[in-house]
Image (tube, rainbow, N blue to C red):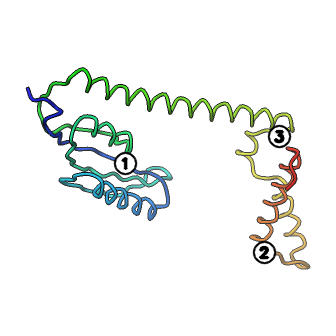
C-alpha cells in the first residue's frame, strides 16, 4: 500500500449550482469553474446543460483534479461543497493516525461552526417573531397574504382613474416606504 501523504490523489468531483434567472446560473457555473482552475490542478472539466426544475434553473460541472493529500481534498470539499467525489487514484492507500485525525478535526470544526450559525439564526428568528407578536403582527400572514393596504389603494385608483393618473410603480414604491415606516414606528424606531 502507498502512503497517501507521499502520493497525490486524483479525484472527480461534481459541483452543482441552482437558482434563477437562467443567465445568472450560466454565468455563475462558468465563473466557478474558472476560479477552481486558477486555484487547483485541473485535469479535465465539463459543464453540463442547464435545465429547468420547477421554478429554478440547475446545472453542474464535473471536474477531475489532482490533490496533494487528503487534507487538500478536505479543504476543497469545505470550500466548494461538491455533491459527489470519486477518488480515481490511488486505488488503495493507508493513513497515519495523524492524517486521519486532521481530516476528522477539520470536519468537526466546520460542523461546530455551522451548528453555532444555525443556533444563532434560530435564536434571532425567535426574538424577531416575539417582537412581531408583541406588536400584533402575524409573521406568517406577512409572507402569505398580499398587502391589504396596497389592494385597497389600487381599487380606489381604478375608480378614480378618470380624474387622477398615477403610475403603478410609483404607487408600489410609496406603499413600500409607508409600510416600512409603520413597521419601524411600531418597533419604536424613527425612520
Given contact means CB atoms under 8 Å apart, are the residues at marks 2 and 1 in contact? no
Which residue is at 74% across, 47% downward?
145
Given contact means CB atoms under 8 Å apart, are the residues at marks 3 and 2 in contact? no
Select label 3 or label 2 by which is in front.
Answer: 3
Q: Which quadrant of the figure contains the N terminus?
A: top left
Residue 183 is labelled as none
Would residue 150 appear left or right of 28 to someone viewing this image?
A: right
Label 2, residues with CA under 10 Å away: few <14, some 14-19, many ≥20: few
Instruction: Using the image, determine if residue 111 lies above or below residue 164.
Output: above
Q: Provide the residue designation for mark 2.
A: 167
Instruction: Please state which of residues 140 and 32 is positioned toward the viewer in this rendering.
Output: 32
Report how far apart the C-alphas of labels 2 and 1 lie in the structure: 41 Å
Residue 160 is situated, as x and y percent measured from the top left of the image, at: 90, 73
Q: Provide the residue designation for mark 3.
A: 137
Q: Secondary structure at mark 3?
A: loop
Label 1, residues with CA under 10 Å away: few <14, some 14-19, many ≥20: some
Sequence-wise first label, 1 or 3: 1
Residue 23 is situated, as x and y percent measured from the top left of the image, at: 44, 65
Would residue 162 appear left or right of 147 to someone viewing this image?
A: right
Residue 30 is situated, as x and y percent measured from the top left of the image, at: 35, 61
Report how far apart the C-alphas of labels 1 and 3 lie in the structure: 38 Å
Q: Secondary structure at mark 2?
A: loop
Given contact means CB atoms under 8 Å apart, are the residues at marks 1 and 3 in contact? no
Sequence-wise first label, 2 or 1: 1
Instruction: Using the image, determine if residue 61 lies above or below residue 174.
Output: above
Which residue is at 49% across, 61% downward?
21
Q: Provide the residue designation for mark 1.
A: 16
Sequence-wise first label, 3 or 2: 3
Select label 2 or label 1 by which is in front.
Answer: 1
Amino acid at each position: 500500500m502507498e502512503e497517501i501523504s507521499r502520493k497525490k490523489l486524483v479525484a472527480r468531483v461534481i459541483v452543482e449550482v441552482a437558482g434563477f434567472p437562467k443567465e445568472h446560473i450560466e454565468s455563475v457555473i462558468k465563473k466557478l469553474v474558472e476560479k477552481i482552475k486558477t486555484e487547483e490542478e485541473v485535469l479535465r472539466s465539463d459543464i453540463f446543460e442547464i435545465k429547468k426544475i420547477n421554478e429554478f434553473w440547475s446545472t453542474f460541472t464535473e471536474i477531475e483534479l489532482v490533490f496533494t493529500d487528503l487534507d487538500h481534498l478536505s479543504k476543497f470539499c469545505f470550500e466548494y461543497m461538491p455533491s459527489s467525489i470519486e477518488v480515481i487514484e490511488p486505488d488503495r492507500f493507508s493513513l497515519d493516525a495523524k492524517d486521519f485525525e486532521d481530516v476528522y478535526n477539520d470536519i468537526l470544526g466546520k460542523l461546530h461552526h455551522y451548528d453555532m450559525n444555525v443556533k444563532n439564526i434560530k435564536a434571532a428568528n425567535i426574538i424577531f417573531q416575539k417582537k412581531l407578536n408583541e406588536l400584533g403582527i402575524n409573521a406568517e400572514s406577512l409572507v402569505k397574504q398580499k398587502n391589504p393596504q396596497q389592494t385597497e389603494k389600487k381599487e380606489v385608483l381604478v375608480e378614480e382613474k378618470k380624474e387622477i393618473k398615477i403610475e403603478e410603480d410609483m404607487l408600489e414604491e410609496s406603499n413600500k416606504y409607508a409600510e416600512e415606516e409603520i413597521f419601524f414606528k411600531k418597533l419604536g424606531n424613527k425612520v
